Image: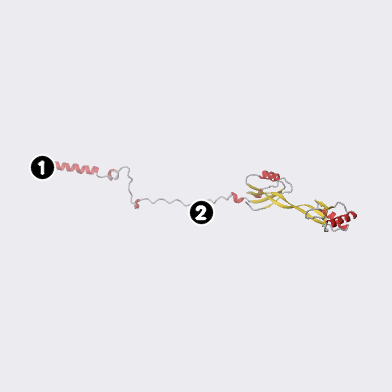
Amino acid sequence: MFLRLLFVLLIALNIAVGAWLVLGQDDSHGRSVTDPGVPMLHLLSEQTPPSRPAIPSPATVPAPAASTAAALETRCLAIGPFDTPQDLRNARTALTGPGVRMRSRQEQTTETRAWWVYLPAPGARAQALALARRLEAANVGDYFVMSSGDQSNAISLGLFKDPANARKRRDEVTTAGFPAQIQERTEQVPEYWLDLVVADGARFDWQGRVRTAGIGSHSTTCF
């Protein structure tokens, strides 16, 4: 009886050892030591260091392209003066285009309108009339005794657009013995300007577009 029990135990022990050899050796049969879906752990010393990005040498870095704007010559011009707002609008229409920024402005300027030849007032009204009679006696015609204004009792000898004609009249009256004088007559008049900022000023030809006579240009402050 004892021998039979010993024999059964030996068989069971052999079966257990065989099962352990078959099922317990994970690495020899390629089985994973982790559960499915769980990543394999590695020691830091076992990990491959990440590769560093390649830094191009200075010789391989392309040089930046030259800025197109830097190659352009910006100009700031004032064109004028225009006599009328319509002339200004016509010029603005003719100069409108890419790379051109414009603004219109109006200024007041002093303009000579005429030259006045006259005899200063001699004093009271009676003295002015007496001087006029002397002019008549000396055959100096075309005069007028002023009766109002800041030149009251002065004697007007003519108003001339051409300064040369004014000087001629003064000399004639002076030769006749009267101290004639010339006074420039001015007034405030509006004038109109067109300011431009031109990106490619070196090639900008405004003269070829604006046909208004007497128009010029000069540099001005950019805006």
Secondary structure state at the residue bearing disc 2: helix
Position in image of residue 60 (x %, y %): 51, 51
Residue found at x 71% / y 52%: 109
Position in image of residue 189 (x %, y %): 72, 50
Observer-nearest of 96 and 172: 172
Tag of residue 3:
1
Tag of residue 58:
2
Q: Residues within 10 Å of mark 2 (few under 14, many from 20)?
A: few
Quadrant occupied by the N terminus = top left
In this view, 174 is above or below 83: below
Q: Residues within 10 Å of mark 1 (few under 14, many from 20)?
A: few
Q: Nearer the viewer, mark 1 or mark 2?
A: 2
In this view, 211 is above or below 118: above
Please name the colour scheme applied to the rendered image.
secondary structure
- Return the residue found at the far left: 1
Observer-nearest of 118 and 95: 118
Residue found at x 10% / y 42%: 3
Q: In the shown orientation, is residue 153 left or right of residue 101?
A: right
The kind of residue on which mark 2 rests is Pro
Observer-nearest of 140 and 82: 140
Residue found at x 70% / y 51%: 108
Q: CA distance from mark 1 to mark 2?
A: 90 Å
Q: In the shown orientation, is residue 161 left or right of residue 74?
A: right
The kind of residue on which mark 1 rests is Leu
Secondary structure state at the residue bearing disc 1: helix
Residue found at x 19% / y 43%: 16
Position in image of residue 145 (x %, y %): 83, 53
Tag of residue 213:
none
Observer-nearest of 128 and 155: 128
Q: In the shown orientation, is residue 31 left or right of residue 17?
A: right
Position in image of residue 132 (x %, y %): 86, 55
Assess whether mark 2 and mark 1 are in contact (beta carbons under 8 angstroms).
Answer: no
